[in-house]
Image: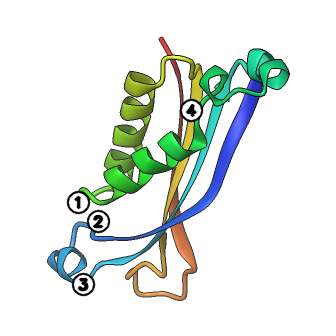
Amino acid sequence: MGVIKLKNIRTFSYHGCLVEEGKIGSDYSVDLEIKTDLRKSSFSDELADTVDYVHLNTIVVEEMAIRSKLLEHVAQRIIARVFHEIPAVSRIIVAVSKLNPPIGGDVEAVTVQIEEYRS
């Protein structure tokens, strides 16, 4: 088995419970880690034998463009879509971070992380 990681996928999105967050938007960062079998691709050197990280990035960017009130909801949508579209993925860890969140304090980011295994 092996791991593919996409770190710090940056988006400008409109998530949040406050009405203003849906209008103003904010900067976000997403980290995605998937577990898959990399043995075949490590020998074949063929993209068709692995999980294409361009596909993973596309899923993250498209799901981040859909407004949600909660980061948990966005993270779960990313997980569901990866499992649906990429059968070779056996485990996913996704962390969605809102940078400079409006929580009345000096906080760099708020992050929600979810880990799931294919059932």
Nearer-N-terminus badge (4/3): 3
Residue 71 found in image quarter: bottom left
Nearer-N-terminus badge (1/2): 2
Nearer-N-terminus badge (4/1): 1
Q: Residues within 10 Å of mark 2 (few under 14, many from 20)?
A: many
Residue under label 2: 15
Viewer-proximal residue, 53 or 18?
53
Q: CA distance from mark 1 to mark 3?
A: 12 Å
Residue 107 found in image quarter: bottom right
Residue under label 3: 24
> Which kind of residue does numbered mark 2 sit on?
His
Nearer-N-terminus badge (4/2): 2
> Which kind of residue does numbered mark 4 sit on?
Ile
Q: CA distance from mark 4 to mark 2?
A: 22 Å
Q: CA distance from mark 2 to mark 3?
A: 10 Å
CB under 8 Å between discs 1 and 2? yes
Residue under label 4: 92
> Which kind of residue does numbered mark 1 sit on?
Arg
Viewer-proximal residue, 48 or 74?
48
Residue 58 on image: x %, y %: 43, 49
